[in-house]
Amino acid sequence: MPATFAEQYRSLLKDVFLDLARKELEQGADGLTYADIYAEQGKPDFALAYLSLIDVSDEVKRAIFARAYERRAEISEEKAEAFDRQFHRPFPLIKLEAQKDRLAAQQVRQ
């Protein structure tokens, strides 16, 4: 039997993000909306915190979490290209991190 979203990603949760998410939810924030916003900003740690606290299907959680990694990869690649133009040299480590994020997104989707 496959692991649930919570079981699979519990080890990645960081207390600082979880505490922030809890406080926002206690103040009436919509956790799904916040998870979507953070995914679009390329912030998987924040998205994961909200996803771990809301009641939606694991399929929805995985899609949002994967999108957070994909978006962070896009942002990193854009940054690497901008730095390349600005400083006239490549930034392979940023591109490597983007590749890792794309791989993480693939693994989440599977």
Image (tube, rainbow, N blue to C red):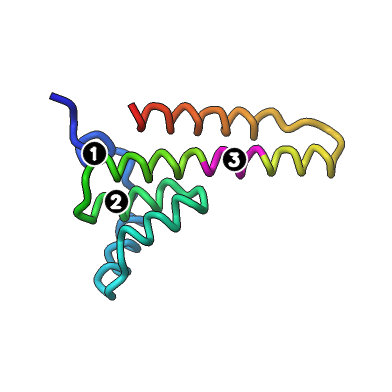
The disc placed on residue 51 is: 2
Picture coordinates of residue 44, whole percent (x, y)? 43, 46
Q: What residue sits 19% from the left and 54% below the top?
A: 55
The residues bearing labels 1 and 2 have C-alpha atoms spaced at a distance of 9 Å
Q: Indicate whether residue 4 is drawn in magenta.
A: no
Q: Earlier in the sequence, mark 1 or mark 2?
A: 1
- Give the residue pinned by disc 1: 5
Q: CA distance from mark 2 to mark 3?
A: 22 Å
Mark 1 neighbour density, 10 Å: few (under 14) some (14–19) many (20 or more): some
In the picture, which quadrant includes the C terminus? top left
Residue extending farthest to the right is 88
- The correct choice, above or below, for 38 with respect to 90 in the image is below
Residue 63, given in percent of the width and then of the height, sits at 36, 41
Image quarter of residue 22: bottom left
Q: Which residue is mark 3?
A: 74
Q: Main structural element of the magenta stretch: helix, strand or loop? A: helix
Q: Are marks 1 and 2 in contact (CB under 8 Å)?
A: yes
- In the displayed structure, 1 sits above or below 26; it is above
N-terminal of the pair, mark 1 or mark 3, is 1
Residue sitting at x 68%, y 42%: 78
Residue flagged by tag 3: what amino acid is it?
Glu
The secondary element bearing badge 3 is classed as: helix
User: At 56% across and 38% down in the image, what residue appears?
Assistant: 73
Graded by Cα atoms within 10 Å as few (under 14), some (14 to 19) or many (20 or more), the crowding at tag 3 reads: some
Q: Bounds of the magenta span?
A: 71-77
What amino acid is labelled 1 in the image? Phe
